[in-house]
Image (cartoon, helix red, strand yellow):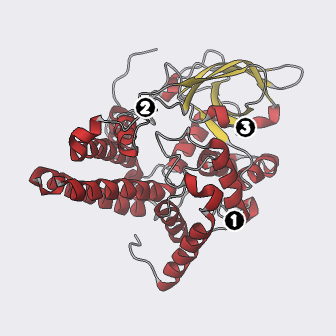
Amino acid sequence: MKIGFSEQDERFRQEVAEWMSTHLCGEFEPLRFRGGPGDEHSFPEERKAWERKLAEGRWTCVGWAPEYGGRGFSITQQVIFHEEYARAGGPGRMGHIGEGLAGPTLAAFGTPEQKQRLLPGIVNGTAFWCQGYSEPGAGSDLANIKTRAVQDAVSGEWLITGQKVWTSLAHESDWCFVIARTEPGSVGHHGLSFLLVPMAQPGITVRLIEQLTGTSEFNEVFFDGARTAATNIVGKPGEGWKIAMALLGFERGVSTLGQQMQFHNELNQIIAIARANGADRDPMLRQRLAEAWSGLRIMRYNSLRMLSGVQDGTLRKEATIYKLFWSTWHASLGKLAMDVLGAQAELLDAEPYQLTRLQSLYLFSRADTLYGGSNEIQRNIIAERALGMPKEPRPRP
């Protein structure tokens, strides 16, 4: 595991920092520190324009191989880029699902035609993706998928019927990768396929979900005979589970270091408030601030450890603990922010009574331990896949 950085690495860090300083200004200045979790509804068109600006500077898909339009950066360079991006206040990426999930999955499992047709839009910041996994009865239990797809006998197109939920930025997306059941009578992880579905078509209805924060970045997506071409299946029919699991491995990739830099920014803001309002003189709050700092360092070192191997979508043992650790830590940070603010945490300045950044952090982080696999499911994954313990007993179907 590489913890330190060489002089060459630090020169590259300066290059990234200077580019961000030069370009994250003017029309893009309002985007600084905006658009992250709990704030993804903010400035969607401006953030899409920012994606195109990043693409002009060749700062999208930096870890992708050159043959796919990337720059082939080393893990160290990718870590530095994501850290400096977050340090500069780079906005939440509108293209992160395409760049971090759809793209690597297509690179690993897609056909040459699919790669040639779909990857350039991600690199250029002109095509945006969402993820069609969770359903009302298949959230953490992804194998309980009910959405179905049948193939038209004449055109070969796939006709999709069902519902997805908690679909981030579906209302802003051009494509959705959908896990659907294509084998009638199949159960569990058998008989699933991985389909690429264009969003702008009859048969797809997107409904916003208003959250506790008053924002709406998640959606319900209804498929009522929506169509996608026969060429838009990744892998073979029935291989959807294998591909879906590989995609979740890519999700625990190098962008986790950027996420941690955002956490670092939040913690610094909380520490600054504690110093200003005297909360740092409370020994219990000082202890919790120190524990938050320590937890963030542990998170960083584990991420560097899990990034030290081959990034092929395999869920390595050290990666299995990441979601459980960061979500629990971040929820605690939200509570710490409110305790440091004291009575101020319950006040809003004036109409339109918009939540502050830390109030949004507290409310949104309540969901961190649920979405993307609840803490209970994460503990099962650690027990069964990392430690080799017996699987949890399940009722017969």
Question: Secondary structure beneath disc 1?
Answer: loop
Quadrant assignment, res 196 = top right
Look at label 1 and name its amino acid. Arg
- In the visual, does 106 lie left or right of 339? right
Question: Secondary structure beneath disc 2?
Answer: loop
Q: Residue 192: in sight, yes or no?
A: no
- In the visual, does 323 lie left or right of 26? left
Question: Secondary structure beneath disc 3?
Answer: loop
Q: Distance between the residues labelled 1 and 3?
A: 22 Å
Look at label 2 and name its amino acid. Thr
Most extreme residue toward the front is: 350
Looking at the rendered image, the disc whose residue lies closer to the viewer, 2 or 3, is 2
**Lower position in the chain sequence, tag 1 or tag 3:** 1
- Few, some or many C-alpha atoms within 10 Å of disc 1 (few <14, some 14-19, many ≥20)? some
**Residue 49 % position (x, y):** 69, 51
Foreground residue among 34 and 163: 34
Residue at the location (73% across, 59% down)? 68
Numbered mark located on residue 263 in the image:
none
Looking at the rendered image, the disc whose residue lies closer to the viewer, 2 or 1, is 2
**Residue 291 % position (x, y):** 21, 55
**Residue 299 % position (x, y):** 34, 56
Q: Residue 396: in sight, yes or no?
A: yes
**Residue 317 vertical placement versus 380 (above, below):** below
Q: Distance between the residues labelled 2 and 1?
A: 35 Å
- Few, some or many C-alpha atoms within 10 Å of disc 3 (few <14, some 14-19, many ≥20)? some
Residue of label 1: 58
Residue of label 2: 213
Q: Distance between the residues labelled 2 and 3?
A: 26 Å
Residue of label 3: 174
